[in-house]
Image (cartoon, rainbow, N blue to C red):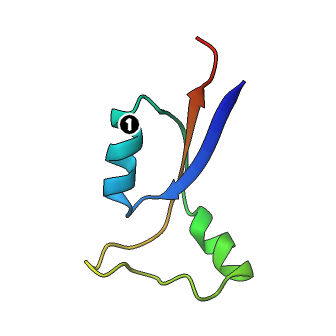
Amino acid sequence: MCLWLVTTNNNRSARQFFEALGWNRVAVHRGAVTAARRLKPEIPMHDGDGTPIEDEIEYEYPLEK
């Protein structure tokens, strides 16, 4: 059993935080945010730093080791 989360490629601080806590990056879904924009068109194309928001990054954290 594990916990699971998804963040976007531009969210560097969240990715660093979860990786420091021992979360495992298990997948990168290239271009997934394009599909998400069909359901939620208010997702911006770029973040405040100008980084394109394109990919979803999937993490897992095992609850049993």
* Image x and y of residue 10, in percent: 37, 64
* Image x and y of residue 26, in percent: 55, 34
* Image x and y of residue 46, in percent: 39, 80
Q: Which quadrant holds the N terminus?
A: top right
Which of the 4 image quadrants contains residue 63? top right
* Image x and y of residue 64, in percent: 64, 15
Disc tally is 1
Query: Foreground: 64 or 51?
Result: 64
Query: Foreground: 17 or 7?
Result: 17
Residue at 56 percent of width and 63 percent of height: 31
Residue at 61 percent of width and 62 percent of height: 32
Which of the 4 image quadrants contains residue 11? bottom left
Which of the 4 image quadrants contains residue 9? bottom left
Amino acid at the residue labelled 1: Glu
Residue at 39 percent of width and 33 percent of height: 21
Left or right relative to 5: residue 46: left
| Residue at far bottom of view | 42
Left or right relative to 3: residue 50: left
Query: According to the image, label 1 marks what residue?
Result: 19
Query: Foreground: 55 or 49?
Result: 49
Residue at 51 percent of width and 60 percent of height: 55
From the viewer's perspective, is residue 13 above or below residue 42?
A: above
Q: Which quadrant holds the C terminus?
A: top right
Left or right relative to 11: residue 56: right
Q: Residues within 10 Å of mark 1 (few under 14, many from 20)?
A: some
Secondary structure, mark 1, is helix
